[in-house]
Image (tube, rainbow, N blue to C red):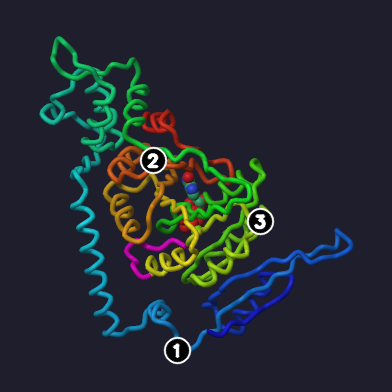
Amino acid sequence: MKINKYEGYDLDALIEEAKRELGNDLKILSYEVEEEKSIFPFKKRKKYVLFVEVPTPEEGFLEMLAKEEKNEEIDRFLAKIEAMIDKKIASLKTSQPEVFPTPPHNEQVVVPTKEFEEFTGDALELINTLLKKEVEPKIAKMLVREACGLDIDTNKLDLNTTFFKEAIIKGVQKKIKFTGPLKIQKGGLKIKAFVGPTGVGKTTNLFKIASELVINQNLKVAVISIDTFKVGAIQQARAYANILNIPFFAVTDSKNLRKTLSNMSNIDIVLIDTVGRSHYDYWRLGEMKEILGGGNELIDISLVISCNYKNSEAAEIVNRYRTFFPINSIFFTKIDETYKPGILLNLPIKMDIPVSFISTGQRVPEDIKLLNPERVANYILGE
Ligand SMILES: Nc1nc2c(ncn2[C@@H]2O[C@H](COP(=O)(O)OP(=O)(O)O)[C@@H](O)[C@H]2O)c(=O)[nH]1
Ligand SMILES: [Mg+2]
């Protein structure tokens, strides 16, 4: 692989120069920012070094695919691998202990007496409330049971709490795991990556976290963007990193990730942003897995999911990502864009994955909250 190096004081100008030489479909490998030393502090300037891959005709297999060349051989091979992955996903699904039907999308949810005949009174009322928020029936029953006792008159289950909120908190405490705040030690290099579909809010929320760590916790943070395809996608992340004045690197392969990580001796936490792909895009996910796997260090992976996804869609996304990455936690976003946030209960319970944060709007850095049972209950009840 041939690499061109561009040095200068204006990063955008360097990118433009590289584009003029190598074409618009530029593949930036990495870039470095150096504070130029000067005896006059006010004369300090930032110097950028940009490394760009020079495209060659004999590219690797993945690059070839990236260009979407029509090649029957490759198409057949792809179809075969996709079938294998589908089979793997299907086996994962069947290994789930239960099947959870999705409730219909209508406002007027009537509790069918047969399905919920074990409940009475307020318990039934709460189930109705949960179904309206698109909590799946089995999940609703499972949660409400945790806050019930036997009503002697009817011999059925009724709430033993005064308020719905208390009942939901009880259920959530039993059924959902919470990661709690990020545990970062000064000097101990922690690596956290955000994966998930395009547009869910990975980049903006990564920088909400980065801001909190830099500004309030005084930690040394670096950001690495893994972009396996388009260069334009890193611009937004780079802009945020410049605002926070933290080191930012863009890498496109595992060797560079390893190299970049090995130079981070004085960093407390590295946040890795990935460029979202369709979860049906096996090749991009495969590439990303390869790059993330190249870091050697243990990477804590958060799957970012928008609360306005349909339940079935979200489950599908989790299953697909799970075949590629060990998902340590779910990071919910866009709670402000839905008034039926049943997904907050359905997904972590069905998938048995801990939950971490929730993004409550577009503002960086303030629109983010750590999830706990009380917050989940508030969002479900719309408080
Ligand atoms: N309403 C709302 N918008 C959000 C939230 N989080 C992110 N966004 C917006 O969603 C869009 C995509 O975000 P981005 O971070 O670029 O997504 P990415 O492709 O996953 O990196 C941006 O316009 C964000 O401002 C949220 O919690 N609520
Ligand atoms: Mg992004």
For discs 2 and 1, the disc positioned in front in the rendered view? 1
- 160 horizontally vs 268: left or right: left
Of residues 244 and 217, the one nearer the viewer is: 217
- CA gap between label 1 and label 3 equals 39 Å
Disc 2 target residue: 338
Does residue 337 sit above or below 240 in this rendering? above
Q: Residues within 10 Å of mark 3 (few under 14, many from 20)?
A: few
Does residue 269 sit above or below 296 in this rendering? above
For discs 1 and 3, the disc positioned in front in the rendered view? 3
Q: Which residues are magenta?
A: 275-283
- CA gap between label 3 and label 2 equals 41 Å
Residue 319 x/y as whole percent:
29, 55
Residue 22 x/y as whole percent:
57, 83
Disc 3 target residue: 266
Q: Quadrant of residue 383?
A: top left
The residue sitting at 21% across, 48% down in the picture is 96
